[in-house]
Amino acid sequence: MSQTLSLLRRIAATCLLAALCSHPLAAATVSKLNDDVLAPLRGPSAAKRILLSKVPLYEHGTAAVDLEEFEVWAPGGKLIVSDGKSVQYLAPPPMRFFRGMVNGDAESFAYFSVDGRTGAVYGLLSTRDGKFSVNAARRRPMTRDRSESGDRGDDFDYFLTASDQSDELPMTGKTWECGVEKLPPVSQINKRLHVQADALGHQIAAQGITGTQSYAMAVDIETDDELFAAAGNSVSAVTALATNLTGAISTIYNRDLHINVVLQNLHVYSGGPGTDPWISTSDAAVGLADLGNNYHTNHATLKRSAVIMLSGKATFSGIAWEGTIGMGDFPATIIASDNSHIPTFGGAYAWCGSIGDLQGAFTSTVPDPDSSANGTFGMPPGGNNYWPLTEYAHELGHNLAGHHTHCVAITAGEAAGTNHPGQLFVDMCHTGEVDNDGSGHTSACATGSDFASAPTEKGTIMSYCHNVFVGAVPQSRFTFGQAAEVSHHELDDYMLRAAGPLPLFGGSENIVTAVGTFTMSTITAASTVGPSSTGNTASVTTTNGGSVTFSWTITGGTITSATNTASITYTAGASGNVVLRATAFKNGTNGSGFADGGVGITDTRTVTIVSCVAPAVTGQPQSVAVPAGTGVTLSVGATGTSLTFQWFIGASGVTTTPIGGANGASVNVAPSTATTYWVRVSNSCGTADSASATVTVQPIAAANFFLLSPCRVLDTRGGTPIPANGVLNLVVTGKCGVATGATSIAVNVTVVSPAVAGLVTVYPGPANTVKPVISTINYTAGRTLANNARITVGVDGSINMFNAAGTPLDFLIDVAGYFK
Amino acid sequence: MTMHTISRFVLLSIVVLMTAVSASAQSGPFQFFAVPPCRVVDTRNPVSTNGGPIVGNGGQRDFAIRGNCGVPSTAKAVSLNVTVTGATTASFLSLWPSGATRPVVSTINFTQNDPALANGAIVGLSTNTNDLSVFNSGGNVHVILDVTGYFQ
């Protein structure tokens, strides 16, 4: 690019001198243009290349505007009008579009549109000397009978409005073609709005253009009820707005970023309030969430590079996802201004509010004495209103990975005068920056100017300088400035790079459209695989395939074959999910000019495969007998990944009586009569059934008392105390003369020098009996204490002792007799 | 009292009740039925027959033991663990079959310095619906009764 642009720089320097010698028009100066100034544009057969040689931008001189024709609407583009009852698919308006430079200055641009039906001309010029707009005002009374004239351009007067005489200060040393190759990284530079990139990579959907080193970016434009109302309930006015905005922005983007923005579909809602698909909000963040959710739900298959909302809602702000151009949707959360968290889908979405705010945005009118509704709606008819253009260009710039330029480093000298001398920035218009990264800093990047004072130099489209005024003139320029360099480097990650020389403007661009009906099948693969298993296969097929290029990615495993074929083999991870993603790419018919063949259609499929170990029962639930009224815990031991359990009453395998809520490895049961239980263990790889276990119930039986010689049946001192908050099980039958079959023992229990206060619950065995809520002895720290008790013995001849205290407890049981 | 009676009733040192009742109260012999230990009274619970309120100064509560915790309506006496907690002053409890004159017995003695204290007891049951009476000599105290068996 250096040769071409060096030449243009020299031209620019010459013209700059010329401009200084001829004072530009003062701001808000309105001049009626002589008919011959725009005559080359108004001719019914205007040439592809036009020179407007006498545009009166200066008090005592004119400028030459070199224009070439270009396209704003994509081939096959549609105007989609919904009135709430039906939807019309209309052809784009019959407009011609021209773009170029003023006096050959590479820092200028000019954009004109000509309405093919009426001949009305709209124009926008931005130079080092200021911003100018050209508007048409219908002559009143008409000078000719309309039926004879065909409503051609002679029915209009044309006015030039100078809006900004203070724009002569260039951004010091910062032309966008400067030689910075790669700017030093700063913490904000990779920041995205709340989310990071899709871990599986970026899907490129941007369309390339043959024969130039430009890119075409197809945008889908949405509007709303509010914009329709602000445009005087006119479909053609909304269409003119969206078309002219896109054309002017494409001109800027082409100059700075070598991107042609083309309008794919324009949605207009003409049914009146409440008939558009959008929720009512005054919060741009809510609007962005709404846009993402709507497109994710309704337009998942729509091929586009970005979606722009031009809203008439009075949010006074816009918002967009950063670095998302060409990406698919991804789940995300937006934090609204009221701090609520709104789930949505991120992606290449940009949301622009207050587009229809005529009150604040359009500060002057074309001086038509016969009409209060002057000019062509939708583009600034005069004054310093460039909010819609700035906002659209700014938010779409975010989609293109463009950061706020007060967060983009440039040189040490630039940063020396700021509050952050160690950081380097393209410009200093940070005002109003919000804390999107959660850093807690609302001015995380450059500081040095605010709403009350103008910056030392003007800011870029990606700055907040539109909020900084000198007089009524916002201190921003229609350029990416040096941020274009940053965007270029980042665009490398997202866009398809073409070969060949780089003209300033796109040449014979030819947008590639649909490539047949190519689609890819879903991925054929086993739904479950063994952990760490090898040689697993997955494959896809395509329709209308032809020369299709495949690529695969995997998470949770390793691809062990080539990845550029329709079938792969892979090794699964040790456990968890294996996610396979297949992408097929078919070359477009016009893709020959691209080094990487990157023109065409991609299709992507994802499948999730579970890597798991089938369940197996390793420890069966055990049959047990318990005293009536006693609960018991049944447990199963099992192996396998991500197991689930369901316990049943009945014989193993009989699933007619599941136990509600019994979904763990153990279950507490307290049957009143003998009952059989079993459990089914499951995961994604299968099921395993346990054996049956029967809980039998010992009825409460009459017992006689048998006196024993006093005998200490338990003394934990020097042995195993009752654990802290734990259970000690002791078989008492067969000891101290307690007979087998004893139902209760008469005892004195003693706690020995407990360290802390607590209590002991003594209850019948077996060990897995559910502990009742009772106490047998309560104790305090340091106090050896005894209590008399009769302790019910379990069917297995054992008792359980639970120590409800944080330290182990020494415990004595002296038996005096038993009941049997 | 005879040795015969003693062997039937397992009268250990704490069973002051049976000795305190006059000789005319003797009955039996009975057999023992061990039940899984079960909390039948807890005055810390909401107000109910076997729940709150706390037993007050010189207060008496009559509780229903038979029909709860596996103790049948035919039971004549119950094997208990008596636990007190939250005592506001030094006091004692007397337990006896409801409907009879309160005997001069102490089933458990305690002070306000005891966070919780327990004693085992065997107490006769009357045929009233609320078959067991508890008397608190002084202050307020919560009473907890855990059943471990019954006689009939």
Image (cartoon, coloured by chain):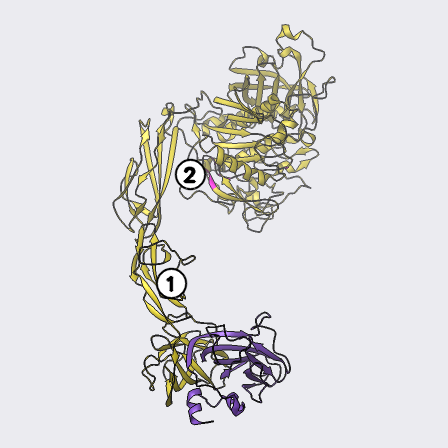
Chain colours: A yellow, B purple
Is A41 magenta? The answer is: no
**Where A703 falls versus A412 (above or below)?**
below
**Extreme-right residue of the structure:** A369
Point out the tag, 2 or 1, that comes first from the N-terminus: 2
Asked if residue A587 lies left or right of residue A160, the reply is left
Q: Residues within 10 Å of mark 1 (few under 14, many from 20)?
A: some
Label 2 residue SS: loop
Check if mark 2's residue and mark 1's residue have beta carbons within 8 Å.
no
Residue A8 x %, y %: 51, 26
Chain ID of residue with mark 1: A
A463 or B75: nearer the viewer: B75
Residue at position x 49%, y 31% in the image: A257
Is A325 magenta? The answer is: yes
Residue A239 x %, y %: 58, 23
A144 or B45: nearer the viewer: B45
Give the quarter of the figure containing the N terminus of chain A. top left
Bounds of the magenta segment: A315-330
**Where A71 falls versus A403 (above or below)?**
above
**Where A568 falls versus A259 (above or below)?**
below
Residue at position x 32%, y 80% in the image: A740
Please name the amino acid that badge 1 sits on: Ser
Residue A666: mark in rendering: 1
**Where B109 falls versus A403 (above or below)?**
below
Asked if residue A682 lies left or right of residue A448, the reply is left
User: Which secondary structure class fits the magenta region best?
Assistant: loop
Residue A202: mark in rendering: 2
Q: Residues within 10 Å of mark 2 (few under 14, many from 20)?
A: some
